[in-house]
Amino acid sequence: MKSFSFAPISNSNANILILGTMPGIKSLELNQYYGHNQNNFWKFMFTIFKEDFSTDYETRKTLLQKNNVALWDVLQFCDRVGSLDSAIKNEIANDFETFLEEHPNITSILFNGQKAAAFFKKYVHLKKTYQLITLPSTSPANASQSFQSKLDEWQIINTL
């Protein structure tokens, strides 16, 4: 099954870019980043930015923009059966050269999981130096760490 990523959520003041790999089935169905209700991404963001949690997607996007965080995926499209990153084949990366030129304030790129970081390092060649940080995946498939342990690592956002 061909999967296509979403347009980025960003604003011109973004100084942090968070990258996932590719939207899963539930996210694609809902046309929302991290749409699966068991994915902890949005819970982490609302906790980190000390805001009341919301399931409203517009509120979620506004939260990121208000805090100068951009959100995108490493891959533009791929073939994948199911939602697991390990099933990704025939992948093509997004155009980071243009995106980063249009977002000159970005200094840190955070990866939501090891696979996002691996695909980025495989396909993207940066002209500028960025702080690259790989964080534990917020996916429910990543059960090797507790919610709190993962959240503690994601709190690095407050120091950037």
Image (spheres, rainbow, N blue to C red):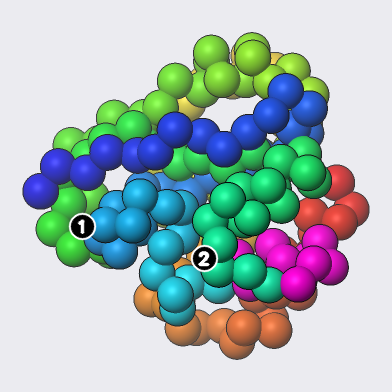
The answer to whether 158 is drawn above or below residue 117 in the figure is below
Q: Amino acid at mark 1?
A: Ala
The answer to whether 81 is drawn above or below residue 143 in the figure is above
Residue at 40 percent across and 27 percent down: it is 94
How many neighbours does mark 2 have within 10 angstroms: few (below 14), some (14-19), or many (20 or more)? many
Q: Is residue 83 left or right of residue 143?
A: left
Image x and y of residue 10, in percent: 63, 33
Residue lying furthest left: 1
Q: Decide whether the magenta segment is chiefly helix, strand or loop.
A: helix
Q: Which mark is residue 98?
A: none
Numbered range of the magenta stretch: 42-52
Between 144 and 4, the one lying in front of the other is: 4
Q: Is residue 101 left or right of residue 24?
A: right
Image x and y of residue 67, in percent: 80, 46
CB-based contact (under 8 Å), mark 1 and mark 2: no
Q: Amino acid at mark 2?
A: Ser
Between 57 and 8, the one lying in front of the other is: 57
Q: Which mark is residue 137?
A: 2
Q: Earlier in the sequence, mark 1 or mark 2?
A: 1
Residue 136 is at least partly visible in this image: no
The answer to whether 15 is drawn above or below residue 149 in the figure is above
Image x and y of residue 101, in percent: 64, 12
Image x and y of residue 14, in percent: 74, 32
Tell me how far mark 1 sits from mark 2, CA to CA. 16 Å
Residue at 44 percent across and 75 percent down: it is 37
Residue 27 in magenta stretch: no
Residue 140 is at least partly visible in this image: yes
Name the residue that disc number 1 marks.
87
Q: Quadrant of residue 68?
A: top right
Residue lying furthest right: 159
How many neighbours does mark 1 have within 10 angstroms: few (below 14), some (14-19), or many (20 or more)? few
